[in-house]
Image (cartoon, grey):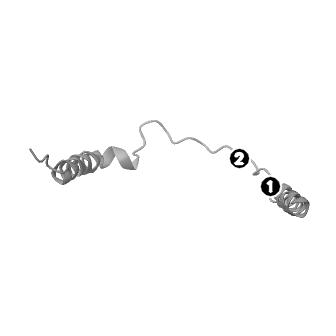
Amino acid sequence: MKIRKLKLLLALFVLLSFKSYAIPAPPVPQPQSIPPPVGAPVPIDSEIWTLFLGGILLGIFFILKKPKPMF
């Protein structure tokens, strides 16, 4: 039993020591970019109808897939 505890303690020590070396360095901060001008077209503005259509179709799919009660 004493050897088993020693092996467990040794394994724990080895795992924790490797974990301390595995911590990555913090990322370098990116320079601030210039925000887009007000009113510039963004992808969701011109294709918002596809988002609504996809939501409706997904809702219909889940409603039809729902198992029917057996009574």
Where, quadrant-wise, is the C terminus in this rendering? top left
Tag nearer the camera, 1 or 2: 1
User: In the displayed structure, would residue 63 be above or below residue 18?
Assistant: above
Residue at 80% of width from left, 59% of height from top?
22
Residue at 76% of width from left, 51% of height from top?
28
Q: Quadrant of residue 34?
A: top right
Residue sitting farthest toward the front: 1
Instruction: Check contact, mark 1 vs mark 2: CB within 8 A.
Output: no
Q: Quadrant of residue 7?
A: bottom right
Element type at mark 1: loop
| Circle 2 Cα neighbour tier, 10 Å, few/some/many (<14 / 14–19 / ≥20) | few
Q: Is residue 16 left or right of residue 30?
A: right
Residue 8, image x, y percentages: 84, 60
For disc 2, the marked residue is: 31
Where, quadrant-wise, is the N terminus in this rendering? bottom right
User: In the displayed structure, would residue 33 be above or below residue 8?
Assistant: above
Q: Amino acid at mark 1?
A: Ile
Residue at 41% of width from left, 46% of height from top?
42
Q: Amino acid at mark 2?
A: Pro
Residue 62, image x, y percentages: 22, 50
User: In the displayed structure, would residue 32 be above or below residue 22?
Assistant: above
Q: Earlier in the sequence, mark 1 or mark 2?
A: 1
Frontmost residue, 69 versus 63: 69
Element type at mark 2: loop
Residue at 87% of width from left, 58% of height from top?
5
The mark found on residue 32 in the picture is none
Residue sitting farthest toward the left: 71
For disc 1, the marked residue is: 23
